[in-house]
Amino acid sequence: MAKPVVLHLGDDIKWNHELYKQLQDKFTIERSYSMDRETFKNALKTKQFGDFAAMYRPFWNTGGEMGNWDDELISLLPPSCKIYASAGAGFDWVDTKRLAQSGIIYCNAAAACTESVADAAIWLILSTFRNFSWSSTAARSLDPAQFSNANRNIAAVTHNPGDHSLGIIGLGRIGYRIAQKARCCFGMRILYNDIRRMSSDVEGTIEATYFERLDDMLSEADCVLVATPFAGDKLLDTAHFDMMKRGARLVNIARGKLVDEPALVRALEEGQLVAAGLDVHYDEPNVNPTLAKMSNVELLSHTAGASVESHIGFERLGMENIMSFFETGKALTAVNLQWIEQPKL
Ligand SMILES: O=C(O)C(=O)CO
């Protein structure tokens, strides 16, 4: 029997060579490398990759040159395609519901970058309490006046995070790991809001308090952390910032489009919020210029998950998802099963 075909998107794998050999033994691998949208669409229309059964994207920095996976692209996939396993935790660039309508499972790779994202979140949380952004900008200015100003004045406005509360929006795998670290390293009190409540066992491990209503948690948390996937709608706007405690902080490691940035700027300017830490931005790769100038705002270039360990994991998990699906009928980290009838191999 002919081996099923896997379409490998993007660069060659770099780390998991033994596992890739197993993939090559079990599947015929076709490659698209880094085609732009028109070239990729044309390749699908002319069946350049044959009737592939799976798509594998091991990295988030290549293999996405065709742009967003919307109806236009998904409708060109062959009916043989059953699973798309990709790098990355977030999947705002792919319409997973539309994939499900074509019977295609989408598997993300949050499991592979959880540790890196959680570590970066801890950095951002700490920075919003201790105002490291001000201190580091002053040191890098090479201006003795700025250095002395920071050195003299920061202590009066910064705090230890311990004895403060962290309100997590979205206690998924990443949110939970951040909660563990914040509880264990800083002794923060953990609050969370999610569409579903965790078991009392899970809550017990981090001594977490559940809030069914986001608004109730916002009015209680000293630092609000956004750790929920972007589902097409903004999550936090002026009304939400107004509900937050005066002098609270905001950290976003999820997606920039979840937060109304002009509203965040206003909340910071008015002192409603005292600090923010953002790995992600509304209009990446452009950063809001007003936020960039604020010394109480820590900014990263969407690199919370960016580590060698994450990338090794992305490669592995994508292959494991595909192999598991074809061997057992079950993928390991599918995120769109709620819209899909159990696919038949
Ligand atoms: O994996 C992702 O989607 C991330 O944004 C991690 O930072």
Image: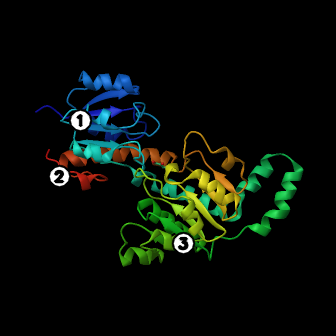
**Percent from the top left, x then y, of residue 157?**
76, 67
Q: Which residue is mark 3?
A: 183
Which quarter of the figure is the N terminus placed in? top left
CA–CA distance between discs 1 and 2?
Answer: 26 Å
The residue that disc 2 covers is 342
Three-letter amino acid code at disc 3?
A: Arg
> In the image, residue 58 lies at what x, y percent?
39, 39
Side (left or right) of 275 relative to 197: right
Whole-percent x, y for residue 98 in the image: 28, 44
Q: Find disc 1 in the rendering and name its residue.
A: 25
Figure coloring: rainbow
Question: How many numbered circles are shown?
Answer: 3
Give percent across and percent down for residue 195.
Answer: 37, 66
Mark nearer the viewer, 1 or 3: 3
Mark 1 crowd level (few <14, some 14–19, many ≥20, 10 Å Cα):
few
Precedes in sequence: disc 3 or disc 2? 3
Beta carbon at label 1 within 8 Å of ligand 1: no
In this rendering, would 137 be left or right of 39? right
